[in-house]
Amino acid sequence: MEFISSRHFPDDVQGDMILANSIGFLGMKQHQVMEDGTGYKTKHRQDLISSTDKNFRPVEMEFAPDGSLYMVDWHNVLIGHMQHNARDPLRDHVHGRIYRITYPSGPLVEPAKIDGASIEVLLDNLKLPEYRSRYRSRRELRSRDTDEVLEKLQTWVSNLDTEDENYEHHRLEALWVTWGLNKIDKNLLEYLLKSKDHRVRAASVRVLRYMGHQLENSQELLKTAAADTHGRVRLEAITAASWLPKENGLEILEVAGKHPLDRWMEDSFKFAETRLTGNFLDTAEEENLITTLEGEDLEVFAQGKKIYETEGYCITCHQESGTGLQQAGYPTLVNQQWVTGDEERLIKLALHGLYGPMDVMGNHYEGQVPMMPFKGLLNDEEVAAVLTYVRNAFGNKASVIKPESVKKIREATKDRNDFYTPDELLEEHPMK
Ligand code: HEC
């Protein structure tokens, strides 16, 4: 991801977010970013780039010193989360491209002087509209003599125009410079924590989170931030609290908890509380198990739900609702034969994975995205539980899968080292 921050591009797209996509949609999407209370909302503006080349893999982009946008196409047939062997011969070590994107009717930006520039010039670079130029200047300042930079920074800050609409921003840049030198300017930090601009206050709390140990009153400052009028500032305080020793952290959460927690804050608050109290089990909510199963079967179902919902297991692709993500190539598990039909077919695909074109409920999947094998991750009992879960959750209703059945199929297919293709499975076990 990168934010558009370059005078070479039109004014109205400044601050837009661009996002490289190498699965499903192959290209770069551009979204407008807007404030939305504690967080942000986005609105699709355009597909900046898209390709019909199936191996097009835009993976990284960055604005250059002249304001143009560089983009890297990794051009590789294999993608994923290490489903493929590191030595797979299909891994392409030869191809790849770097593109440069310009806005032909606008002039380029004159590159900021950074390498070899004086400290004064580097500090003035912090006023530039281009984020990347400011970022590179801050990095350069970190490599210069600390005392000299700090001294010149004082002068630079005191000479700033207080009427400048970016005055607060420039002072925040100055605070970041002192952070980069590992010598926080405490006065500046305290000023900025009281800034009129909530973005500056939130950014200052972030600095406090990392550098609070250099301040004697950081606890008090965080408590004030935890009661801020703006949600984003309170969210930063909650996050900072999660890193503190128990007593200190809980004290800050208590303050934050007296204010409304919106959807941006709830999870962070819960996480901070759990982390500080160590009560991982107490915070687990009563599971709402919706199914027709009963007794022992219900217990297996509950175990299966836990596995299904573990990050990186089924939920990550097929989603909590079981409905998958059609655009990303993850099919639905709701009310269809692959799940509720033939047991052996289902066990086989869960053990060995699935890779290749298929149709599910009228949707065609190109099969460019593989489902990884679970044979190495789950034992027989666990495979049986998670499959019992998917067969009886989301409104599905089908027989319970027994660990013995999984064991039998694991044994019968133990020499298999490859994904199943949907066609292969359908040949072995046709749909009824
Ligand atoms: C990395 C993402 C991913 C994970 C994790 C994953 N799947 Fe899949 N799953 C897929 C994809 C992609 C397909 C379709 C493969 C194809 O198109 O050939 C699929 C297909 C299926 C199918 C057959 C088609 C259908 O919609 O019924 C079932 C059943 C299934 N998965 C169940 C599971 C279960 C159970 C788990 C957890 C144990 C799981 N999957 C974990 C990505 C995933």
Image (tube, rainbow, N blue to C red):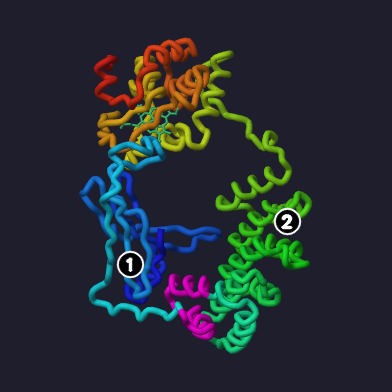
From the image, tell me which residue sits under label 1.
Answer: 69
Q: Indicate the quadrant where residue 349 lies.
A: top left
Q: Nearer the viewer, residue 148 or 154?
A: 148
Height in image: 427 above or below 320?
above
Residue at point 44% right, 74% down? 133
Q: Position of residue 375 (x, y in %)?
A: 44, 23
Report if residue 171 is visible in the image: yes
- Give neighbour class at mark 2: few <14, some 14-19, many 20+ (Cα, 10 Å): many
Q: Which residues are magenta?
A: 116-140
On the question of residue 320 being in view, the answer is no
> Which is more toward the observer, 85 or 111?
85
Main SS of residues in magenta:
helix
Say how many tags the image has. 2
Where residue 241 appears, as percent x and y from the top left, is 69, 54
| Res 314 label | none
Residue corresponding to mark 2: 252
Question: Measuring 39% from the left and 17% from the top, which residue is drawn there?
Answer: 414
User: Under tag 2, what secondary structure?
Assistant: helix
Q: Is residue 184 left or right of residue 66?
A: right
The image quadrant where one finds ligand 1 is: top left
